[in-house]
Image (cartoon, rainbow, N blue to C red):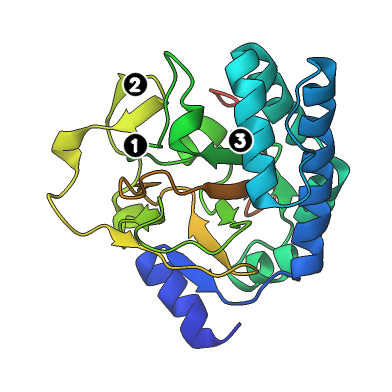
Amino acid sequence: MSAVDVERYRRDGYLVLKRQFAVEALDACLEDIYAVFNGMARRWRLTAPEARDLPSLTAVMTAVFDRDVASFMAAGKLAQHTIALHRLGCDEAMLAPLRAVGLQAPVIATRPVIFIIHDALKVPGGYHKSPPHQDWRSMQGSLDSAVVWIPFADVAPGGHALEVLPGSHMRGLLPTEEDAFGHRVDDAALPTSGFVALELERGDAVLFSSFLVHRTGQAGGRRRGWRPAIATTMCSSPPSSSAAIPTHTSTGLI
């Protein structure tokens, strides 16, 4: 990563990393996810063909969802604990850009999180797309903590793309309002325009500050969107006896 890239990250709060991850690593993650949902489909004796690629995975997910929403959610949660996905979080392709922007001893603050966006898979009473939010409020790591967002498939601006608000990380923690998603940034704290939809190819990644305001793009129709987002955090310096130590995925300090 060049000095120009680092400066861009510090200014804008995010950086697109082209061809950062080997597609073979993403394929390994998908193989584990296929196994989870195929197993759930067999449990319910569903007739959907086994998942072997993204279109067939969509079909299996839809079949499980239509049969039992709780089982669909359970399979989705289990998929976030698969070995290949956690191995991706420890890959040098993950760690190198974090170190380049100043996280010299990065640790994984949360489990990998897979967001599944498809209009046929809207959980009743839940949320379907992420509203404007800042990840730091939920993860509460160090002030330089970062998130790495990796698509499993190409994502275009019209396909429920990740939308970011450049420079918003410089405003600190913004006021929020309650939402089915959790804490969404209060509309009064946001500009009326300025979000940028990121176009990404398979193997690309986005590195962004946990204070950056971002959301799921509303445009997309019935197109699929897949992404594991791995949050990493660290303490920038050794804590003194009078310093508070950020805890991982907590709501306070110890």
x 77%, y 28%: residue: 78
- What residue is disc 3 on? 246
Tell me where residue 159 sits by quadrant: bottom left
x 32%, y 19%: residue: 178
Q: Quadrant of the C terminus?
A: top right
Q: Nearer the viewer, mark 3 or mark 1?
A: 1
- What residue is disc 1 on? 131
Marks 2 & 1, CB-CB < 8 Å contact: yes
> Tag on residue 179?
2
> Tag on residue 251?
none
Which element type, helix, strand or loop, lies under badge 1? loop
Count the marks: 3
Q: Position of residue 138 (x, y in %)?
A: 51, 31
Q: Is residue 83 left or right of residue 240?
A: right
Amino acid at pointer 3: Pro
Amino acid at pointer 2: Asp
Q: Position of residue 162 (x, y in %)?
A: 42, 54
252 over 244 or under it: above or below: above
Does any portion of residue 248 appear in the rendered image? Answer: no
Q: Position of residue 44 (x, y in %)?
A: 78, 15
x 57%, y 55%: residue: 149
Amino acid at pointer 1: Pro
